[in-house]
Image (cartoon, rainbow, N blue to C red):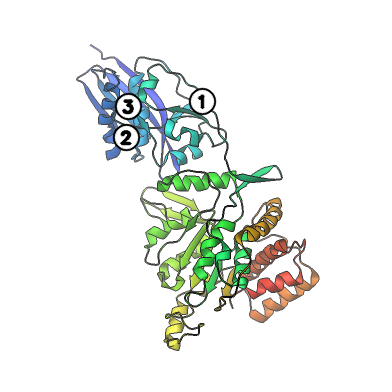
């Protein structure tokens, strides 16, 4: 006698650096009762069989006395996400009911009592999904509702599906200050947890920090221990330019993948790995996103720059130049964006006293070896270099005042469509004749590379924006040239 079969299909997805769609397909066969999951399901997914059984039976659902086979397609894609629990359970729950799930993406981890839980990768999946209608845990639904062009259907327990009513929750707004430039909204937070007014003296270094923040320019501070290098860079994050909605969502995605709370705070990321960090920790590996990708749209800060491994410093060159890093795996290649402001601090010598009033204990050879750990190609990718002295005079400028200037410069950049550090290499810079003559003399005198010339022009454009100059003027280009390390 021919055995009857019946198949149910529901759409879901997993995330491993990018979104992969998974079709959950369950068939029911009249045979000895069993439940199996196929399609390269990892241990966490295989364990979902017990969670699904308990969740359904604890909510008075009679588990079918049939042979149940769930296939996760494509079968050659490894699957480890527990967010597949809910779609698998729904294919069983709706065995004898006809519901059109084709327009929905279903995500959710199940508890033994039937509660539906969120996973760290859920925000990233929804943000990158082609589906407009998303069924997700209620605990994350209001957060997901802030993603534009998505209909979110939140559920707390699988028992709510017994009497199915699909009503999207109301979309919510981002509760932070914003400015609108050319009909595009940008968000910012003007609460300064760390304030530049706390840094004694160093007015010239603060000027460099202002330029760095205004145009998202890479910066390197050199100075003796205790002069305020790290203090300045730690405060830099709070005066960075406002973020677009796309950037804000990307930042929140990175936080979610780390397991951090999603609060839509528009303060840009700040990552400060220790100099003993491994290459995989900085650039990412098979199982984990790296520090450089987590710093996307924000700051990656290397304190004690020469102490980092030489291979790590050399491998920084391409991400800083191209704005992306490629991680090659056995079965795939993942590309992460690295649009970062690279900030670094270093001592002038191994003991740190060369530029201070204290006695330096280092020999000339030791100082040379110390500085040679940083190659010229890496230095060439640093927009701003500044050497700090022991200046501990009274300081008057605050983060609020600096941020006001950043906002003025940002409005000009937003209208161009680029932050100044990210202007295309073929951009037509508008210079006064005096500024152009000074730049030519600097190129010849210092034998500057084409990259150095472009860096100077981009920094000069930011200085001109801060000075509210339409053209790059003589004073702007002179200041920009002064920040190149030669």
Q: Position of residue 473 (x, y in %)?
A: 76, 68
What residue appears at the point 64 percent right and 56 percent down from the top-left corner?
419
Left/right of residue 481 with respect to residue 291 in the rendered view: right
Q: Which residue is mark 2?
A: 39
Tell me the element at label 1. Answer: loop
Cα–Cα gap, marks 3 and 2: 24 Å
Q: Residues within 10 Å of mark 2 (few under 14, many from 20)?
A: some
In the displayed structure, would residue 266 be above or below residue 92? below
Left/right of residue 383 with respect to residue 271 in the rendered view: right
Image quarter (top left, top right, bottom left or bottom right) of the C terminus = bottom right
In the displayed structure, would residue 54 be above or below residue 462? above
Cα–Cα gap, marks 1 and 2: 31 Å
* Residue 30 visible to an observer of this rendering: yes
Quadrant in which residue 2 is drawn: top left
Residue mark closest to the camera, 3 vs 2:
3
Q: Which residue is mark 1?
A: 168
Whichever of callouts 1 and 2 sits on the residue coming sooner in the sequence is 2
Q: Which residue is mark 3?
A: 114
Whichever of callouts 3 and 2 sits on the residue coming sooner in the sequence is 2
Left/right of residue 28 with respect to residue 22 in the rendered view: left
Image quarter (top left, top right, bottom left or bottom right) of the N terminus = top left
Towards the viewer: 6 or 439: 439
């Amino acid at each position: 006698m021919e055995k009857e079969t019946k198949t149910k299909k529901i759409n879901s997805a997993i995330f491993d650096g990018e979104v992969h769609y998974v079709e959950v397909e369950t068939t029911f066969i009249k045979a000895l009762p069993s439940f199996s999951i196929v399609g390269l399901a990892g241990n966490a997914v295989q364990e979902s069989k017990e969670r699904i059984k308990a969740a359904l039976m604890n909510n008075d659902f009679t588990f079918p006395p049939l042979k149940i086979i769930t296939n996760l397609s494509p079968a050659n894609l490894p699957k480890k996400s527990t967010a597949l629990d809910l779609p698998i359970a729904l294919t069983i729950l709706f065995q004898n009911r006809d519901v059109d799930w084709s327009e929905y993406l279903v995500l959710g981890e199940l508890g033994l009592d039937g509660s539906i839980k969120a996973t760290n990768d859920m925000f990233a999946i929804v943000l990158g999904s082609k589906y407009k209608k998303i069924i997700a845990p209620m605990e994350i639904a209001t957060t997901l509702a802030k993603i534009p062009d998505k209909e979110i259907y939140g559920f707390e327990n699988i028992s709510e599906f017994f009497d199915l009513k699909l009503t999207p929750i109301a979309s919510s707004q981002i509760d932070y200050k914003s400015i609108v430039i050319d009909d595009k909204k940008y968000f910012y937070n003007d609460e300064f947890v760390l304030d530049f007014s706390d840094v004694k003296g160093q007015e010239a270094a603060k000027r460099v920090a202002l330029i760095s923040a205004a145009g998202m320019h890479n910066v390197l501070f050199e100075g003796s221990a205790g002069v305020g290098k790290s203090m300045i860079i730690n405060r830099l994050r709070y005066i960075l330019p406002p973020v677009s909605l796309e950037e804000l969502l990307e930042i929140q995605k990175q936080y979610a993948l780390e397991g951090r709370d999603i609060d839509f705070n528009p303060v840009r990321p700040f990552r400060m790995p220790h100099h003993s960090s491994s290459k995989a920790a900085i650039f990412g590996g098979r199982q984990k996103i790296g520090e450089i990708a987590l710093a996307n749209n924000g700051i990656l800060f290397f304190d004690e720059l020469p102490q980092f491994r030489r291979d790590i410093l050399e491998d920084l060159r391409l991400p800083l130049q191209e704005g992306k890093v490629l991680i090659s795996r056995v079965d795939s290649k993942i590309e992460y964006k690295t649009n970062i402001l690279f900030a670094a601090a270093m001592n002038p010598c191994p003991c740190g006293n060369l530029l201070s009033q204290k006695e330096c204990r280092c020999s000339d050879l030791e100082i040379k070896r110390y500085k040679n750990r940083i190659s010229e190609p890496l230095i060439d990718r640093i927009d701003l270099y500044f050497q700090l002295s022991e200046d501990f005079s009274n300081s008057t400028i605050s983060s609020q005042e600096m941020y006001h200037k950043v906002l003025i410069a940002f409005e000009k950049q937003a209208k161009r469509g680029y932050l100044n550090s990210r202007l295309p290499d073929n951009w037509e810079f508008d210079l006064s004749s005096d500024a152009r003559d000074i730049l030519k003399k600097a190129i010849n005198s210092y034998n500057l590379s084409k990259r150095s010339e472009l860096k100077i022009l981009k920094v000069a454009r930011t200085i001109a924006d801060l000075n509210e100059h339409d053209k790059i003027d003589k004073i702007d280009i002179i200041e920009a040239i002064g920040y190149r390390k030669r």
